[in-house]
Amino acid sequence: MGYRKFLFLLFTVFASAGLHAQDREDVLKQADGYQWPSDKAVLEKLDRWQDLKFGVLMHWGIYSVPGIIESWSICNEDWIKRPEGSVYEDYKRWYWGLSDEFNPVKFNPEQWAEVFSRAGMKYMIFTTKHHDGFCMFDSQYSDYGIAHGPFKDNPKKDVAKYVFDAFRSKGFMVGAYFSKPDWHHQGFWNSYYATPNRHPNYDVKKHPDWWQSYVEYTQNQLRELTSGRYGKLDILWLDGGWITGDAVGINEILPKARKISPGLICVDRTIKGPNENYQTPEQSIPEKQINYPWESCITLTDSWGWVPDGNFKSSRKVIGILAEIVAKGGCLVLGVGPTPEGLIEDKAITILDEIGEWLSRCGEAIYSTRIAEHYNEGNLWFSKSKDGKTVYAVYALGDGEQLPDSVHWKGYMGYLPEGKVLLLNTGKSLRTTIKDGVVTVKLPKGLRQEPLAFKITTVRQSRILP
């Protein structure tokens, strides 16, 4: 691709993000190591992905059987918690042995897709393999996986295939999570040595043959996932940032994968460079707006996988998180773990249905929006339509809070409506007054106690300082 053509593509992406020409240099300075893709198809898919705003990330594996933290309990680091008095090597053997108990006889990916579709989610990422090396797809390179244990005779033993197909049928963008580290493989954690931490447990320079076996194994599994056997993928979400994609040959795999799945978004997470097509703050939201593609990955409970009696976030809480992330320019992927039987549990469904019902009325303030210059004031989070002609404001109502009688905003770059202010929750226009640069929207009585979404159809921007 020629340099001038590449600059044009960059301009297209910035324009679609609602940025003015004078902002582009600042954006490049702010990018914190982000490198825009040079592939036009990837840029176009990133733009479509940024329209979706809300997705789901499913962690499901042998850790779901006892309902414990995924993989990490077998890693011997100071922060890891295991049962008091347990012996590390005995614990590891017990954990590996959970593969003999994982038999999700109620596995129902159609239920998953239906639940998450009703929730208003638009893209999905499924964990095909976590750090423990247990494969949730039928890999010919490993017998440590769902297709080789008690579930092996089930017609849906190639779990990932049926998950991807179910979500494609609902119109989702489809993504495959894959851990680059594999603690079960002898080329990564060799049983000759102890396993002190998340890294290879040997000196790679002294055992290049061990390391090469791991690299080839990882490449083979990535080819299995991206060669078309699982259909076209939209996102390849590579976890385990202490191993780079370069180390396992992702630069050789991606060009071929993108012939099968044009525009495939690669997320070599935490590895800044050409293969981290969007960045992924985990269990957190950036302090300020970010003008390149990013996604906060945040759990519905306190854990990625299913745990019994999980501490669930309320629908209000999730909507508030989503509104803040969207106002700052990102997407939210919500972590929801299926049960060991293969279903989404009822309590999660209740909360997700509440979120989806709200989005069915107020989603215009979320989907296909881009950042606004003035993006936050108190409980209010602002965004704009892609053409910049409409401003949206979401009033995030916290747990235990009640709606006020009226909503106000003011300040530098605040938005003064010249037309109507529409409450998307009800579809009705609201009475609005403006005095000394302060907008007051009077709320009608009897509203549901829920986050509010306002549509400001025609605006002028105030330059009045607070």
Image (tube, grey):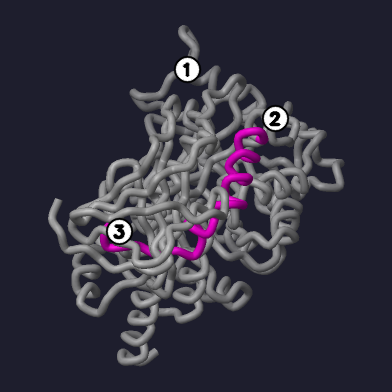
Which residue is tagged 2?
346
**Sooner in the amino-acid sequence: mark 3 or mark 1:** 1
**Cα distance between the residues tagged 3 and 2:** 35 Å
Which residue is tagged 1?
82
Please report the residue visible at 63 percent of the width from the left and 45 percent of the height from the top: 357
The secondary element bearing badge 3 is classed as loop
- 3 and 2 marks in contact (CB < 8 Å): no
Would residue 390 be seen by someone viewing this image from the given angle?
A: yes
How far across and down, in percent of the image, does residue 165 sit? 74, 58
How far across and down, in percent of the image, does residue 220 sit? 59, 60
**Cα distance between the residues tagged 1 and 2:** 28 Å
- 1 and 2 marks in contact (CB < 8 Å): no
Of residues 452 and 17, the one nearer the viewer is 452
Which residue is tagged 3?
290
How far across and down, in percent of the image, does residue 52 sit? 53, 60
Please report the residue visible at 61 percent of the width from the left and 24 percent of the height from the top: 67
Please report the residue visible at 42 percent of the width from the left and 28 percent of the height from the top: 401
Task: Name the front one of labels 1 and 2.
Answer: 2
Residue 89 is inside the magenta segment: no
Residue 350 is inside the magenta segment: yes
Majority SS type along the magenta span: helix
Of residues 270 and 419, the one nearer the viewer is 419
**Sooner in the amino-acid sequence: mark 3 or mark 2:** 3
Indicate the amino acid at tag 2.
Asp
Please report the residue visible at 59 percent of the width from the left and 46 percent of the height from the top: 127
Q: Is residue 254 left or right of residue 14?
A: right
Q: Which residues are magenta?
A: 349-374
